[in-house]
Amino acid sequence: MRDSHRADAERLLVRAVEEEVRRSGGRTDGNVLLSRARGALDSMARSAAEEYEAYVRALDEAAAGQLTFRQRWAREGAGTPLLVAAVAAVAAAVADLALGTGAGTAVGAGVTAGVVGAAATVVKVAGSHLPAAHHRAGAVSQPGGPEQLRLQWLTALEVRGIRPFLDQQRVLAASTGRKTTGPGPRLRGADKSAAARGRTVLEQSFAQLPEAGGVFAGRRQEMARLRQWVQAARASTETKPTVVVLYGAPGSGRTTLAVRAAHDLRDHFRGACVVDLRGDSPGEQPLPTRDALLHLLNRLGAPREQLLFRERSSADQQVKRLSELYHQHLTGVPVTVVLDDASDPEQVRTLVPERSDSLVLVTARAPLDLPADLPAHVHQMAVEPLDAAGAEELLGAAAQDASGPYDAESADRIRQLCGGLPLALRVAGSSLGPRSPRALAAGLAAYGPVEPVERALWLRYTDQAEPARRLLRRLALAGRTSLGTPAAAALLATDETEAARQLAELSRAGLIDHVRGSRYRLHDVVRAFAGPGSPTRRTRPSGRRRRSG
C-alpha cells in the first residue's frame, strides 16, 4: 500500500475505533484497540485488494496521460514556430533597412513581427493544454474515475476489513471478561440487558422496512449518486450525517427510491427506520415531532424506561428531552432514517442525528430549504419522470408477460400517457400480457383529459371484479395504516382465504403496495382515488373504454 493511501486507511481506522469506543459507552480502551487495529491493517487491507488495485490502476493511467505545459510544448514542436518567428523578425528588419527605413523603425518592426509570431505559438499550445487539463480534472470524479474508485476501496476496506476486526475484538473482550475501565462498582446486569436489547433491535430494524422486492427500474443514476455521496461521507475525516432531499411530484417514486436505497446501502449502517411525517397529505395533520422521535427511538433500540415522562411535563419539554435522548442514543451509531412526506425544514432538522455518519433520506414534493447551520452533508435530488429507456424497463418489469413482440411506438405512447411517472407506468404495465402494448396505449388514451396517474388507475380499477373494487374502496377508508388478511376479511365479510386472494389481485394490478408479510397499504394517490368523495364513488371520466386483448 502506498504511503499516501495508508494515511487514508489509517484515518478511516481512527474514525472506526472512535465510533467503537463511543458505542461501548467508554468501556473500551481506544488506545489499545487502535494499536491492535494498526498492527492488523495490512491483513484488513487484503480484504479490499481488488478495489485497491482498480484504484491504483486508474491513478497510474491518469498520470500516464497527463502532460505538463513544458512537455506539451516539446511534444507539439513549438520550438520550430518560435525559430521561424525569430528568422521572420530578422528578415523584416533587414528588408526595411534595405529600403531605406530608419534603423530604429526597422528594428521595431522586426521585434513586433517576432513577438506576434511567438504569441501565436504560445496561444496555440495553451489552447490545447488548458482544455486537456480541464478534462482530466473533470474526469477524476466521474463514474469509474480515480476519486470514485478511491471511495469504493475505502468502503470495501471498512465493510470487509475494519468492521469484522472490531466485531472480533468485541467478542474476544466479552469472552475473556476483560475490563477496560477503571475500578469502581457498576451495575452490569441492567446495562448489559439494555445494551443487548439495543443491539438486537438495531439488527432487526432492517426487517421492519417495507420489502424491496416490488417493481423497481429506471433509477440506476439516482442510486449511483446516493451510493457515491454515502461513500464520500464515510471516507471523510468529519463525523457528519448525509442528508438527501428527494423531491418530485406524487407518483414519481420518491418513497420507493428511498426505501430501495435503505436496503441496498445497509452494509454501511447498523439500523434503519422509516417515519411517515404526513407533511403534504390533504385532510390529515402532520405527524407531531414528539411522535416521530418516539417512533425512531423505539425502532432504533433506545431504552424504553427512558421514554417515560412526568405527568405534568409540557409537550415542548417532552420534545426537548426526546431530542436530547435521540442524539445521545445515536452518537457514533450510523443508521439510515427515511423521513417520508416531509414539509417542515425545522422538523427535519430535529430528526437528523447530527453526531454520527448516518444517512437521512427526506422525501418531499418540493426542495426543502434546510437550515444553513445544519451540521450535515446536504444534497437535493430531483426525482424526475422516467425517460424512454427507464419507462421501457419499468413496463417490462411490471408486465404479467413481457415475451410479446417489441413495439417501440406503443411503448413511447404509453410513457407519454402516463407522464413518465413510475406509479402510473407500474399500474398500467401490470396489464401487459393479457393486453398488447398497442391495446394498452389505446385503452389509456380512451380516458380523455385526466391526470396520468388517474388514467392508469381507472384502467386497472375497471379491470377488477366487483369484490376487489369494493375491497379497494374500503381499504381507502383505513387511511395510511397497513392492513393484513384478517382486516381485509372483515372489510369484505368473507373468510381469510378469499380476502388473501383479493389482496393478491389488487397487488398484482399495482393498486396496493405490499409492505411485508401479509400486510398491504395504499399509496396516497391511490387512497385519494378510491376514498370518500373520490371518482370511483361517482362515475368514470368521459371516453368509453372497450376491454382489449
Image (spheres, helix red, strand yellow):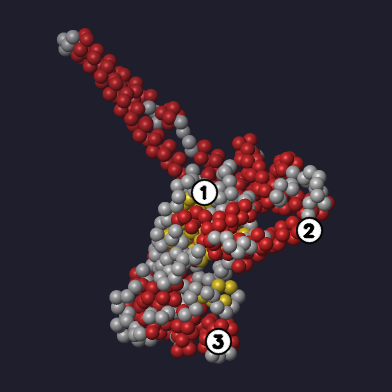
Mark before the other along the chain sequence, 3 or 1: 1
Q: Which residue is more in the foreground, 221 or 94? A: 221
Image location of residue 263, percent across then percent down? 57, 62
Relative to 286, residue 232 above or below? above
At a point 38% along the width and 27% down the height, the residue shown is: 78
The residue tagged 1 is: 376
Residue type for callout 3: Ala
Q: Is residue 543 above or below residue 193?
A: below
Residue 177: x %, y % from top left:
82, 52
Q: Which residue is mark 3?
A: 490
For the point 54% across and 75% down, which residue is it? 482
Q: Residue furthest left?
A: 100
Q: Counting residues from the N terminus, which is met first, the one under dot 2 or under dot 1?
A: 2
Check residue 189 in the rendering and tell me which mark sits there, or answer none: 2
Residue sitting farthest toward the right: 176
Q: In the structure shown, which secondary structural element does the residue marked by tag 3 occupy?
A: helix
Query: Can the viewer see residue 203?
Result: no
Q: What is the quadrant of the N terminus in the image?
A: top right
* Type of amino acid under label 2: Gly
Which mark is nearer the camera, 2 or 1? 2
Whether 10 is drawn above or below 174: the answer is: above
Residue at left offset 26%, top offset 20%: 113
Comparing labels 3 and 2, the label whose residue is closer to the camera:
2
Residue beneath the point at 59% across and 50% down: 356
Q: CA distance from mark 2 to mark 1?
A: 36 Å
Q: How dense is the environment of label 2, judged by Cα within 10 Å: few (below 14), some, or many (20 and up)? A: few
- Sequence-first disc among 3 and 2: 2
Report the side of 195 relative to 108 (left or right).
right
